[in-house]
Image (spheres, helix red, strand yellow):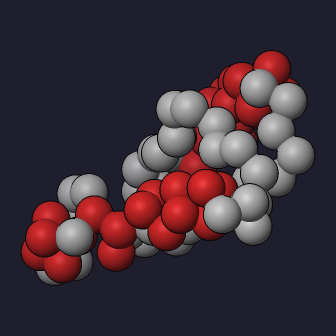
Amino acid sequence: VRHGGYDINGARLDPDVALPMARLVELAEKGVIGELVDPAFSFVGACSQRRLLKRTGPEWVVKFQALAMDAMLLVPV
């Protein structure tokens, strides 16, 4: 986690604040949700929106489709 405009200490102390992986693993182990895709993906939102829409986004869609995921959890941080 990095952001010049926000206090990120909470996420440094407990990464699950930003991405609740421990809870997701727990839910997968209990059978509440299916298998988690490895690796998890992350990107910085403060970037060129044009590049994100024209290049990066479509490239990521291809990666996600190759993983044959049934669902995706988007976590705004």
For the N terminus, which image quadrant? bottom left
Q: Residue shown at 53%/63% (left/top)? A: 26
**In terms of image quadrants, where is residue 46?**
bottom left
Could you say which is closer to the camera, residue 55 or residue 59?
A: 59
Q: Position of residue 33 (x, y in %)?
A: 75, 60
Q: Residue shown at 80%/20% (left/top)? A: 66
Report the side of 18 relative to 43 (left or right): left
Is the residue 68 above or below the residue 16 in the image?
Answer: above
Total numbered labels placed on residues in the image:
0
Q: Position of residue 12 (x, y in %)?
A: 15, 65
Residue 1 visible, this angle? yes
**In terms of image quadrants, where is residue 28?**
bottom right
Report the side of 24 relative to 46 (left or right): right
Residue 73 visible, this angle? no
Could you say which is closer to the camera, residue 52 or residue 36?
A: 36
Q: Position of residue 49 (x, y in %)?
A: 58, 49
Could you say which is closer to the camera, residue 74 or residue 59?
A: 74
Looking at this view, name the residue that lies furthest to the front. Answer: 30
Q: Residue shown at 13%/70% (left/top)? A: 13
For the C terminus, which image quadrant? bottom left
Could you say which is closer to the camera, residue 45 or residue 70?
A: 70
Report the side of 20 relative to 74 (left or right): left
